[in-house]
Image (tube, grey):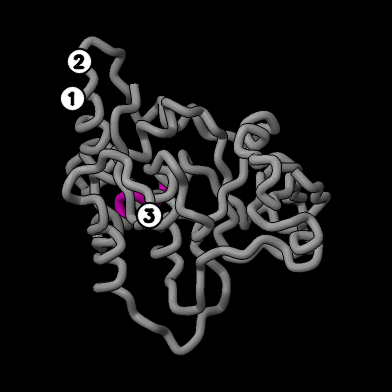
Amino acid sequence: MRTKSVSCFSGCVSGADESDDDDKQQVEATREKPAALDGIIKLRSSGPNSRGNGVGVLDECIAGLNATMPGQMPITIEDIRAQNFSIPSTIYRAARNDASSVLKNGIPSGRSSYKSDDEYLAAIICHTARTCGSEGQVPSFSADFQTSRRFVRPGNNMSFVNVDTTHDPLGFRTIPDILINDVERLVQNGLVRKATVIGAIRHLFDYQEKEVFYVRGNLPSSMIGSAMPA
């Protein structure tokens, strides 16, 4: 079903429309640099995914995606909710860093002290909307062992990493969770475009990667269960 996706990051064009780089520009335009962050990212939206008339941003994005798939079974919000899953105690990643570096330093991310919580959630949606991720700016993990193994490229100094999520279970989020609970706020605040959300929904159903994200930023070495050379 996937024919094109929408991206916020440069370096990998995937057939997106004119909104391809606008999300990143909107994030920059709306960015505020707080004096300090407490390091605790929003874990859930504070409000319903609707604007009071029963139709929210996610409804509109789903309708936009369904319009591109004539003759196919329409996707619903309940279908997205059904794609969600509990974070397992172990998740996996084919890491670009070598095993010794991962064991010592953990897994870095592009989240910095200048990014708000919502900006990072928007970047996660952008990552999922792409066919080639985000070049390490938003590291993704998978709850499925075989999915992560597919991303291993032997000879590229990569490592295959097992992550123990029990050290911080609330720090991990899934894409269905973010779509259901945060998209309304992120789009209304200009941090992500509807076209990008549509790309993320398409990717969710096309690829079935069971993606998981650590929303607090760099994953500390204390959460690394094992790291083996790929």
Alpha-carbon span between mark 3 and mark 1: 29 Å
Disc 2 marks a residue whose amino acid type is: Pro
Say which of 137 and 47 sits in front: 137
Disc 3 marks a residue whose amino acid type is: Gly
Residue 160: image x %, image y %? 73, 45
Residue at point 41% right, 57% down?
123
- Name the element at disc 2: loop
Which range of residues does the magenta coloring cover?
181-185
Badge 1 density bin: few <14, some 14–19, many ≥20, Cα 10 Å:
few
Which of label 3 and label 1 is nearer to you?
A: 3
Residue at point 42% right, 27% down?
205
Say which mark, if any, is on residue 11: 3
* Residue wearing tag 2: 70
Say which of 125 and 22 sits in front: 22
Disc 1 marks a residue whose amino acid type is: Ala
* Residue wearing tag 1: 67
